[in-house]
Amino acid sequence: MFLGIDWGGTYIKIGTVGKRGKCLSKRVFSSQHLKEKEVFIKKIKELIISFKLKRIKAIGIGAPGIINTDKGFIYYLPNISGWENYPLKRVLEKKLGLPVFIDNDANVFARAESCFGAAKDAKRAVFLTLGTGLGGALIIDGKIFRGRTSAAELGHFPISLKGKKCSCGGKGCIETFVGNKYIINRYKQLKKENVSVEAEEIFKKALAGDKVALLVWKEFSYALGMFLSGMINVFNPELIVFGGGVSGAFRIFKPLVQEVIRHQAMWPQAKNVKLVRSRLKNAGIIGAALLAQDNFLH
Amino acid sequence: MFLGIDWGGTYIKIGTVGKRGKCLSKRVFSSQHLKEKEVFIKKIKELIISFKLKRIKAIGIGAPGIINTDKGFIYYLPNISGWENYPLKRVLEKKLGLPVFIDNDANVFARAESCFGAAKDAKRAVFLTLGTGLGGALIIDGKIFRGRTSAAELGHFPISLKGKKCSCGGKGCIETFVGNKYIINRYKQLKKENVSVEAEEIFKKALAGDKVALLVWKEFSYALGMFLSGMINVFNPELIVFGGGVSGAFRIFKPLVQEVIRHQAMWPQAKNVKLVRSRLKNAGIIGAALLAQDNFLH
């Protein structure tokens, strides 16, 4: 049995996964109090013991940042400070006496969806996790694409030369147009109100016909459609898979994004591409456990 | 012996290439009078006969457009009309009685530079041909990256949401910032003169200290650096190889582009990337002949 940890900016989800990619048991915690390294590691250790350590062969972690997967090394986490250049794999293996494997959260999501979800048998696919940030992964020749250090940071492709400052240190990245907080800020700005609102509410308001909410999703879709047209021209993917909290608004933005692609992308590459939502409920846990399983067995 | 045809917007270059990638003989023609299909094919046939057909085993062509390499099929050529959906491989093989292989000109360039030039042994490399348009190719896992139809149309990645109309039908593509005619137009616009000028002259003027010419290359480098930062974040290439006429200004734009990358790209991906000029004088002919050779032998 393998244990998967889906380490997100808001929640940390931990679960055991059986042979056919079924999540067998699951626990969810707020990430809020687990930002510090020592506290995080202590909590993980407690949890793993509670999951009956003996039956677990290896642990996989999908982490929200720039990871060197070969070395199990964190370069940095854009939204959590204090983890710069941290050898998490080595530290956890020492504490737990179990093999630990770490990858970027979007790669882990892509692994799960490729094995058991929306992208089964896809040769070339683009994966986007729409949430606080914009995570990305690529499947090329049926495998997760990797660089020598890190790669597939799709959220940090600039699509504007005069854009806003991004969490990565650059500016104009696609993330600054489609990340959760940018959607919310844009809505507040257009409404000229400083109310507390969530992306999900802006989605519901748009469905109910609220013009400002609709405009926010139109702008979101235009930016996303332009970016994806570039990805289509360069990658010729069969499939673009949308996951993450903001993909709850898929029904609203899919036709708008498709319309932008129809005008912007080159037809030989665009003609057969499909836009789909992720299929798995616990893709983060399942993908992390698969990461552990694949690395443990091979 | 294999024959390579480098089919560009300005010139058509034809040459024979020996085993070690040396161009043995070469002929160059203006493309101007060879835009029509019938004229083009007749001329190719004449030339091939003059090259002593018996010694030639196969012909390779690098074509300036969107090509389906598996089928030897032209979807379209952005700068030459009349070639839409044309089965060039089938037509030429019938006329010549020789195997013919066709690929996009930037892929052919990448093939030559990977085998004998600047990108020997590179696992992941980005290739740009800077000329009338911006051609692109990718080496992934040491091989030319291909989609199911066409791919690696790097020139048609949008980097502006409010950009100019592009030859591909989209807008804001990186090609509209760095293509030859855009550089020239920008120079004329800034000089407020309607004089005839070539990109090479703008390069020489910049070297001589002309402020307007320098500004043109700064703007060019900013756009190119932003785009390449996106490519670095996504691909983590070891190498970015610049070819094509406009790469004559490499000395001016390299340090400027590097400076943009230093600010914009994520450091784990950017720290080891090298920007280099192409090394081969006849990369187009050599790569086309290699295309023929590789496909003929395997």
Image (tube, coloured by chain):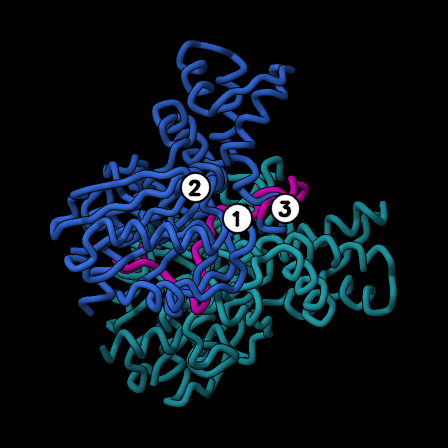
Chain colours: A blue, B cyan
Q: Chain of mark 1?
A: A
Q: Amino acid at mark 3?
A: Lys
Residue farthest along the top direction in this orientation: A209
Q: Are marks 1 and 3 on the same chain?
A: yes
From this viewpoint, is residue A228 visible? Answer: no
Residue at image mark 1 = A80
From the image, state whether disc 1 or disc 3 is nearer to you: 1
Whole-number angstrom distance, CA of label 2 to CA of label 1: 10 Å
The residue drawn where x is 50% and y is 31% is A222
Provide the secondary structure element on which disc 1 rests. Answer: loop
Residue at image mark 3 = A171
Q: Chain of mark 2?
A: A
Which label's residue is closer to the chain start, 2 or 3? 2
Q: Is residue B112 left or right of residue A164?
A: left
Which label sits on residue A31? 2
Which one is nearer the viewer's eye here, B281 or A169?
A: A169
Magenta stretch in the rendered image: A139-167
